[in-house]
Amino acid sequence: MLRHDAAGALGLIVNRPVGALPLARVLESLGREPGGASGDIRVYYGGPVEPGRGFVLHTPEWTGGDSRVVHEGVAVTSDPAIFEAIARGTGPRRTMFAAGYAGWAPGQLEGEIQGGSWFVVTADEALIFDDDAASKWERATERRKIAL
């Protein structure tokens, strides 16, 4: 969850990788010089809203123009400079690039939680950034508190 307030909620899906893109191609698409960038950026489906909009979850030791901490050990940015920092080897220790996001109107998410469509667990760096996306759901459900 990136934001949850009186205006609604905005979050990212973190367990649906959709592929990988060469870092050089990402930089070029952003109008940046690839400068010998190598390697790939894994891309996740962040949600159905604005699929052309990108967010990078990252560890907070790197800070860019709009980077902000959203939870202990986790920050988010949409600043393209993060890809240049990654290419230079000066970026954050861990990253997750998501295309799109999930959004809810005021009160909508609360209603869906009360209706059992969602459950709330505490996230952490290991759960969010782990490359084993297939087991994230199972590990999250293990953290769920069941009320008797």
Image (tube, rainbow, N blue to C red):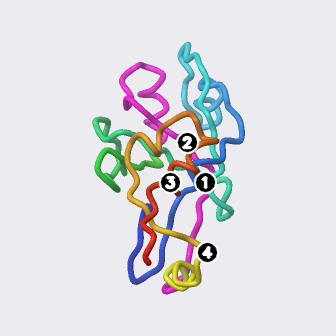
- Residue reaching furthest top? 36
79 in magenta? no
Q: Nearer the viewer, residue 29 or 68?
A: 68
At 59% from the left edge and 60% from the top edge, which residue is drawn? 101
CA–CA distance in space, label 2 to label 1: 8 Å
Q: Which SS class for mark 3? A: helix
* 1 vs 4, front mark: 4
Q: Earlier in the sequence, mark 3 or mark 2?
A: 2
* 1 vs 3, front mark: 3
Q: Disc 3 marks which residue? A: 140
Q: Are marks 3 and 4 in contact (CB under 8 Å)?
A: no
Residue 103 placement: quadrant: bottom right
Q: Disc 2 marks which residue? A: 97
Q: Which mark is residue 46?
A: 1
Q: Are marks 3 and 2 in contact (CB under 8 Å)?
A: no
Quadrant (top left, top right, bottom left, bottom right) of the C terminus: bottom left
Q: Which SS class for mark 1? A: loop
Q: Which mark is residue 117?
A: 4
* 3 vs 2, front mark: 3
Q: Position of residue 20 (x, y in %)?
A: 68, 31
Q: Which residues are magenta?
A: 80-107
